[in-house]
Image: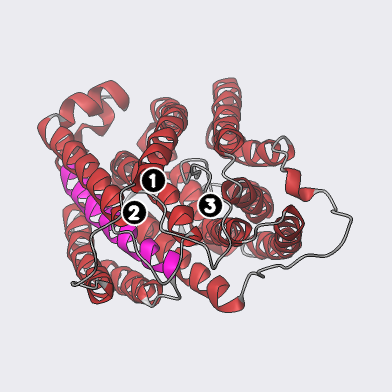
Amino acid sequence: MNTEQQLAAVAPPSPLTREMAVPLPASRVLSGSVIMLIGSGLVSVINFSYNVVVARKLGPADFGNVSAIATLLMMASALTQSFQLLCAKFVARNESFWAKSKIYRGLMKRAWAVSVLAAVGLVLMQKPLAAILKLPSIQLIGFLAVAVAFQAPMGVKRGGLQGQCQFAPLATTFVLESAIKLIAALLLVYVGYGALGAVGAIAISVVLAFAFSPVPLSADQSGKAQACVPASFPEGMQTMVFFIGQVVINNIDILLVKHFFDPQRAGLYAAVALVGRLLYFAAWQVVSAMFPVSAASNPDERDWRVLITPLLLVSGMAVMFIVLLVAAPRLIIGLVFGEHFAQAEALFGLYAASTGIYSLAVVLMTYEMSRKIANTGWLQLVISGLLALLISIFHDSLEQVILIQICMMVVLLGSAVVPVLRSINWRTRPLEAA
């Protein structure tokens, strides 16, 4: 996944045993969210600069080609995010450093096997994929395969840092990847490599970020074996299902637009999606702070402030973001992309509304996942499939594509609310003081 994705960290939980665990105060979620939002803000600025450089230098058509590759990388990030969340969850649940290291090293071996297999599959599918997406060169898919080969192992590294609450090193991995991508793109694009240079910069950034992101858990641990809570298959499957649904919902529209529309309009839509997804990336930082805090607490008890705090934060961000894009789309287009993208101004507010609704649903779904094996991930996967089907049938205009997304996100949000409401004990005692 490219570095516009998840910067995940959280303030350290108390080293309690499972029997002694108590609900952790919502202030930890709030402080963790603030730290991550600051870090992700820097990453977003760097990544946005990369996209602006590429869009202005290459124009809508070639920017659409680069965006299609970046979108495929986002689709492949289901592997990255699954390994990251699974690693973070079980590293956080285990108390001893020996057990944390065992979980980490076991997942790293699996991640390499899966990533290499996925990269080989992409190499074998270069020509069909290039034809479907109307790409000018199969070499673009080749660069994508290089990035995919390092994605899942990078996810395990970040999960190891997240599970130990080492948010400063974790933030560094994202900033490093973004900075390398921007610098490499500036050099390669302006030298004259065009779209190949922009995509090559993505591959270079993933490889170098992996090489220069040490995690203490990678070292072999000698000594007496200790109790270990292993990463279970059901929870691994739940995580994979959730992230497959997530990446389809966030990216399938761009690929389908690239297939069904002409290169000019596909490039315009890619620019709209780039801006709209900034809201989701910011919301994910809040979710990343909430997840380990909730997972480390007693599964039989709930501190509802751990859920309410991120819901309020994400709701506030969504409202402000939508208002800004509705009020001043032309100003944003002029400053960021240039007049070549002016035709897309009516789409910004609609896309932001769809993203905002989905972000709220993700907060609810990940909260349930942190507590137990939840079925909302399967529901999201079904809705992502319906979304792809509906866009394939109804795509008379770019506006229609976004309206379909809004309707499906409303359905998903309504469905995600149901298990949360069912779990509430309306006669619970007052919350303990934080």
- Residue sitting at 19 percent across and 72 percent down? 427
Work out whether 144 lies above or below 237.
Answer: above
Looking at the rendered structure, the kind of residue marked 3 is: Leu
Give the left or right position of residue 355, taking residue 381 as reference: left
Which residue in the structure is indicated by mark 1?
Answer: 29
Give the left or right position of residue 2, taking residue 302 as reference: right
Residues 368 and 7: in front is: 368
x, y (%) of residue 419?
A: 28, 74
x, y (%) of residue 318?
A: 22, 44
x, y (%) of residue 335?
A: 27, 21
Residue 370 lies in magenta, yes or no? yes
Work out whether 186 lies above or below 6.
Answer: above
- Crowding at dot 1, Cα within 10 Å, few <14 / some 14-19 / many 20+, comes out as many
Q: Tag 3's secondary structure?
A: helix
Q: Which numbered disc flags the more N-terminal residue, 2 or 1? A: 1
Residue 338, numbered label: none
Q: For the magenta stretch, what is the residue range?
A: 347-371
- Residue sitting at 49 percent across and 54 percent down? 292
Q: Which of marks 1 and 3 is in front?
A: 1
Q: Tag 1's secondary structure?
A: helix
Q: Which numbered disc flags the more N-terminal residue, 2 or 3? A: 3
Which residue in the structure is indicated by mark 3?
Answer: 73
Residue 306, numbered label: 2
Residues 38 and 187: in front is: 38
Secondary structure, magenta segment, majority class: helix
Give the left or right position of residue 357, taking residue 281 as reference: left
Looking at the rendered structure, the kind of residue marked 1 is: Val
Residues 307 and 108: in front is: 307
Can I make out residue 260 in this image?
no
How far is mark 2 from mark 1, CA to CA? 7 Å
Residue 324 lies in magenta, yes or no? no
Q: Which numbered disc flags the more N-terminal residue, 1 or 3? A: 1
